[in-house]
Each structure stands twice: as C-alpha cells, then as structure tokens.
Image (tube, grey):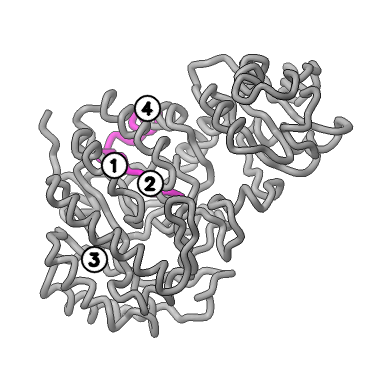
C-alpha cells in the first residue's frame, strides 16, 4: 500500500484546491477546557474546531463515509477532529480508524488532538498508517498555559492552574517527540490570543521545531460567545502575518487554514452541501450499527409522560416505534430485570432491549451505560417530554435542549465549557 502523502490539503498548499477531506464527528468528550472554547453553538455557517451538527458511532460514521465518497470523490483524507478530543474518546477513535483503514486502504488518515492522551496510542496509529497528526500547542510556559486552560482531566483526576498547564505541555511535547520517532508527519497548531500568548508563539515554534515538527499553523484566535476570552479582540491580519513570518524561521507555515468544523467535508474553505448535511443527519438517526434492525426506542419514565426516571430505579421500560406516517407511538411496556446481579443484570437488560437503538433515561451509571453501549444501545440522559425526545431521536434532531448538564459537560464535572473539545 502506497499512501500519497502529498495529497493532504492541510499539509500541502498545492493540494487544497484538488483534494478534499472529511472529518468524522465521533469524539464528543474532551479532557481539557480552553478559555476560548464553547461547544454549545451549531451554526452551519460557522467554521471553527469542535462544532458539529451530529455525533456518529464508528459504524454510523462508516455508513456516512461511504455516502460522502460517492457524492464527493475529491476526498483524499479521513480525519477525526472532535468535536471533543479523539483520545478522550479512544475506543471510538481507534475503532473508526481501524474500520476506515480496512475498507479504504489507500485513504490518508489524520487526527487532530490536544496531545494529552495520545501517547498510549501512537504505536497503533503508526501501524494503521495514520500519516498525519496535528497537536494544538498554545504555550510551552506553564504560567502562560495557566491563563489559557481552565482545567485538565488526566487519569480521572482534575488539575487546574499552573499544575494543569505543566501536565498538558509535558504530555504534548512527549507526544510530538514520539510521533516523529514513529515516522508520523506532525503539524502543530498554535492559536494566537492577543495579550495572552501572542508574543510567546515564537518560543513555541522554536521548541516544536527542535522536536521535529513538520509544519506550523499559527491560527488567529476566534472570539466565541460565553467563554472566558469572549471580550478579547481577535488578532488583526497584520499581527498574524508578522507572527507567521517570525516563526517561519523555524518551520514551514500553513497559511490556508479555514478553522474547519468537526464535521467538515469537501474542499477546504467550502461549506458543507445541503446533501451532505442531510446524509450526516440520516446516519446519526440510524442504529449505532446501521446493519442491525433496531426499530424501537426504550424510555424510563415514572408516569409515561416525561423522561424522569433513573435507569437503576426503573421497574419497566416503555417501548416506542413509528407508525406508517413516521409518527412516534407507544407499542409496549417491558418489565426490567430484577435488581441486583451486577453486570449480569445489565447484560439481561441489553438482551431485553436488543431491538432498541436507544434508551432514554434521566440518569445512568457508568457500568450499565458501558454494557448497553457495547451491545449497540445508546444510553441518552435527558429530561423533558417523552414525545419530544423520542421524535428527536427517530428524526436525527438535536437534543441539546433536553440534555442534562452532566451529559453536556461530557468531562463529567462542573466546568465553564461544554466538554465538547479543543482539538
């Protein structure tokens, strides 16, 4: 297998008008919170990392990719860039990369990460011939980094301030070094934040060049509502150009970055077509494994009107389907497996709901969620009217307005962002 590395439009300016890329949005969780990052908004005209209209499972992503390649034959690169960090979602990320490599052996594979948790996966990335990796490194000085990052979550422990920045920076630099030892082409993104790190980016360039980085992307900070940095002005084109010229002493520059969405598809700079937006929505509304026939949705409810019962307290589950007109209808009520029994109880529940693509609950523990997810049943923690939630799932609509805060903050803790990612 010979990969045409020169066809990557982000790493090669001459390729960007000919070859396209697709980002598969399969990684919703993040392991850091940047003070410029807000994942709540989804405007189809907004291009910035972390924004996506849908989240896909690995198998949904493969179905979507097949449709995308048929509609957009210019695609030469399959990338994973969030909407969170790929390696805060390592199972989904690695499964997707394996599936793509197996089906499309000549496709370039690419991931964009903050670098915190990528180290354990670098050897397999190299084995899968993931040819391009981008790490966003905004500082190499922990004091400066502490102004950029609100928190870092590593090995289930939260870090803040200088300690968080120091941990993140050390992991980033170690990952960059190991990527280059593994023969992977590495790009470094540095976001220029006026008054924070704008005079420091040249030091970042000097450091990462010494570790073997191949190209540098000095990205202008994007002002985003409801973030710590929302009142900071974006850097002027003149300032960005000055920094690019200064850092060019150390590394080649990427100057054509379009700050792509986590669901971007096609030629860089072009917005997603209406047809591709529809294909993404269709994929998201399918069972997690589109090859399975899972026509129903299960709901845990106290009275049958609201999604308002914790999974562990449910004694029965309401089963919804669709009539011939596509309207949601209650079809059945199934008794829950008896309490106790640990993992066996959740395996029994997975078997009980094996014809359901999703289970809507008001709360759920990690153990049952993992078992049900592994059996193709998506556990969705919501609050609100059953009719709205079920209809939304069947039709692939956004359910952000129904999600509980513990789901929106995917890191699982209170934070200033959505946990959606800073890759």
In contact (CB < 8 Å): disc 3 and disc 1? no
In contact (CB < 8 Å): disc 2 and disc 3? no
Q: Is residue 78 magenta?
A: yes
| Relative vertical location of residue 330 with respect to residue 15 in this rendering, above or below | above
Q: Name the element at disc 3.
A: loop
Asked whether the viewer can see residue 295, the reply is no
Task: Give the residue drawn at x 79%, y 17%.
Answer: 335
Between the residue at mark 3 and the residue at mark 1, the CA separation in whole angstroms equals 29 Å
| Relative vertical location of residue 421 with respect to residue 141 in this rendering, above or below | above
Between the residue at mark 1 and the residue at mark 2, the CA separation in whole angstroms equals 8 Å
Q: Name the element at disc 2.
A: helix
| Camera-nearest residue between 419 and 106 | 419
Which residue has dot 2 on it? 87
| Camera-nearest residue between 211 and 13 | 211
Q: Nearer the viewer, mark 2 or mark 3?
A: 2
Q: What crowding class fits label 2: few (fewer than 14 Cα within 10 Å), some (14-19), or many (20 or more)? A: many
Q: What stretch is highlighted in magenta?
A: 67-83
Which disc number belongs to residue 255? 3
Which disc number belongs to residue 66? 4
The location of residue 347, given as percent across then percent down, is: 60, 19
The location of residue 237, given as percent across then percent down, is: 32, 78
Which residue has dot 1 on it? 121
Q: Name the element at disc 1.
A: helix
Between the residue at mark 3 and the residue at mark 4, the CA separation in whole angstroms equals 30 Å
| N-term mark: 3 or 1 | 1
Q: What crowding class fits label 3: few (fewer than 14 Cα within 10 Å), some (14-19), or many (20 or more)? A: some
Task: Give the residue drawn at x 75%, y 44%.
Answer: 383
In which image quadrant can residue 70 be found?
Answer: top left
In contact (CB < 8 Å): disc 4 and disc 1? no
């Amino acid at each position: 297998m010979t990969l045409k590395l020169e066809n990557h439009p982000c790493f090669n300016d001459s390729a960007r008008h000919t070859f396209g890329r697709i980002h598969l949005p399969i990684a919703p969780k993040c392991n850091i919170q940047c003070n410029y990052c807000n994942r709540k908004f989804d405007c189809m005209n907004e291009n910035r990392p972390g924004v996506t209209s849908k989240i896909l499972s690995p198998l949904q992503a493969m179905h979507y990719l097949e449709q995308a390649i048929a509609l957009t034959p210019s695609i030469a690169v399959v990338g994973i860039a969030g909407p969170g960090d790929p390696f805060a979602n390592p199972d989904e990320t690695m499964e997707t990369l394996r599936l793509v490599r197996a089906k499309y052996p000549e496709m370039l594979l690419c991931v964009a990460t903050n670098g915190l948790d990528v180290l354990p996966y670098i050897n397999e990335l190299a084995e899968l011939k993931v040819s391009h990796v981008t790490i966003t490194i905004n500082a190499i000085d922990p004091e400066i980094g502490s102004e950029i990052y609100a928190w870092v979550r590593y090995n289930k422990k939260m870090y803040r301030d200088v300690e968080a920045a120091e941990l993140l920076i050390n992991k980033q630099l170690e990952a960059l070094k190991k990527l280059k030892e593994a023969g992977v082409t590495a790009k470094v993104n540095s976001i220029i934040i006026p008054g924070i790190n704008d005079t420091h980016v040249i030091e970042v360039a000097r450091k990462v060049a010494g570790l073997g980085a191949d190209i540098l992307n000095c990205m202008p900070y994007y002002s985003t509502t409801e973030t710590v940095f929302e009142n900071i002005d974006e850097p002027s084109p003149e300032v960005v150009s000055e920094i690019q010229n200064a850092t060019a002493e150390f590394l080649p520059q990427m100057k054509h970055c379009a700050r792509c969405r986590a669901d971007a598809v096609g030629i860089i700079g072009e917005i997603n077509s209406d047809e591709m937006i529809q294909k993404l929505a269709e994929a998201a509304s399918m069972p997690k494994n589109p090859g399975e026939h899972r026509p129903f949705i299960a709901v845990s409810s106290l009275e049958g009107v609201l999604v308002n019962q914790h999974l562990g307290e449910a004694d029965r589950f309401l089963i919804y389907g669709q009539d011939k007109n596509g309207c949601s209808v209650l079809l059945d009520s199934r008794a829950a497996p008896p309490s106790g029994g640990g993992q066996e109880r959740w395996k029994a529940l997975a078997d009980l709901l094996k014809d359901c693509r999703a289970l809507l609950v008001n709360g759920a523990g990690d153990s049952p969620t993992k078992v049900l997810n592994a059996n193709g049943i998506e556990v969705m923690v919501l609050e609100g009217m059953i009719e709205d939630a079920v209809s939304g799932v069947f039709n692939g609509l956004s359910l952000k307005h129904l999600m509980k805060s513990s789901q929106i903050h995917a890191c699982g803790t209170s934070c200033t962002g959505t946990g959606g990612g800073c890759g």
